[in-house]
């Protein structure tokens, strides 16, 4: 299965600033996904990023707040903009490997604390 | 009502016990069902995948789906301390979007 490297693993940021999270996959994948995992809550899909097209955002998430780039088939970034303490969460990158049509492979996540 | 409900636990069992983890769901269109295991400070990893109803066994793990009751289960036999983790169920109707449970934290005591 695909191996995902996600950076940074954690960060503490000041409110009002932005953080860009990087996701690198060791193989080419069509679809990449960004999730948020808040304590005691289920994983929530933020957006789906396909190479060569605009990301598709889920209800409640907007591009101005969570801009996403997908420059090629192995890399994506998620930016959390104008952060507030409510953005404190774990952010996870995920892919559906091309050789396995079911399930996701997840990165280790970025633990973000906004102070 | 949430799409997927999962008891958060924590569930504490002695080593060697049989563990039963469960999720209920509301959308009858769900037909792809998965269980993920998440260790602390790690991303979820896929444990089991089941399509439609029925059982699937993989080593010490058995996944069951009862679509008539909208209920899925994961059984762990001969539980080990290394099984201590959070277990997440996930499901989808069409593979375009998955809905996750909030996870059940399991602690297997030596």
Image (cartoon, rainbow, N blue to C red):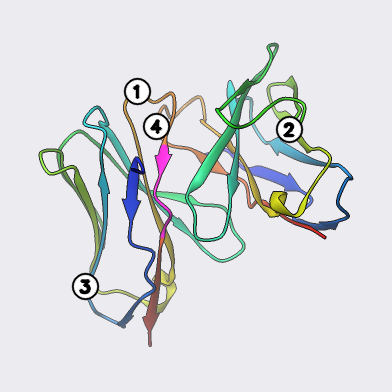
Q: Secondary structure at mark 4?
A: loop
Which marked residue is nearer to the observer: mark 2 or mark 3? 2
Q: Disc 3 marks which residue?
A: B18
Disc assigned to residue A66:
2
Disc assigned to residue B94:
1
Name, please, the residue furthest toward the top.
A52
For the residues bearing labels 2 and 3, Cβ distance under 8 angstroms: no
Give the magenta range. Answer: B99-103
Locate residue B76 relative to residue B66 in the image: left or right: right
Mark 3 surroundings: few (<14), some (14-19) or many (≥20) residues within 10 A: some
Foreground of the two, A49 or B48: A49
Where residue B84 appears, as percent x and y from the top left, is: 43, 72
| Residue positioned 25% across, 74% down in the render | B78
Q: Disc 4 marks which residue?
A: A102
Separation of residues labelled 4 and 2 (CA atoms): 26 Å
| Residue positioned 25% across, 39% down in the render | B26
Which marked residue is nearer to the observer: mark 1 or mark 2? 2
């Amino acid at each position: 299965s695909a191996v995902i490297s996600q950076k940074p693993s954690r960060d503490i940021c000041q409110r009002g600033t932005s953080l860009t999270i990087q996701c690198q996959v060791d193989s080419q994948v069509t679809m990449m996904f960004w999730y948020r995992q808040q304590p005691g809550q289920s994983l929530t899909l933020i957006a789906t990023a396909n190479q060569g097209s605009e990301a598709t955002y889920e209800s409640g998430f907007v591009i101005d707040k969570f801009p996403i780039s997908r420059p090629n088939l192995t890399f994506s970034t998620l930016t959390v903009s104008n952060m507030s303490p409510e953005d404190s969460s774990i952010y996870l990158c995920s892919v559906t490997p091309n050789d396995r049509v079911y399930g996701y492979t997840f990165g280790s996540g970025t633990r973000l604390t906004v102070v | 009502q949430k799409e997927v409900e999962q008891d958060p636990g924590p569930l504490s069992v002695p080593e060697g016990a049989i563990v039963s983890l469960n999720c209920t769901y509301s959308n009858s269109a769900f037909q792809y069902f998965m269980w993920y295991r998440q260790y602390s400070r790690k991303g979820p990893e896929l444990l089991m995948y089941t399509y439609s109803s029925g059982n699937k066994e993989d080593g010490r793990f058995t996944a069951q789906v009862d679509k008539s009751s909208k209920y899925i289960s994961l059984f762990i036999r001969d539980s080990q301390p290394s099984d201590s983790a959070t277990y997440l169920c996930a499901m989808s109707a069409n593979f375009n979007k998955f809905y996750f449970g909030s996870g059940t934290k399991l602690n297997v005591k030596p």
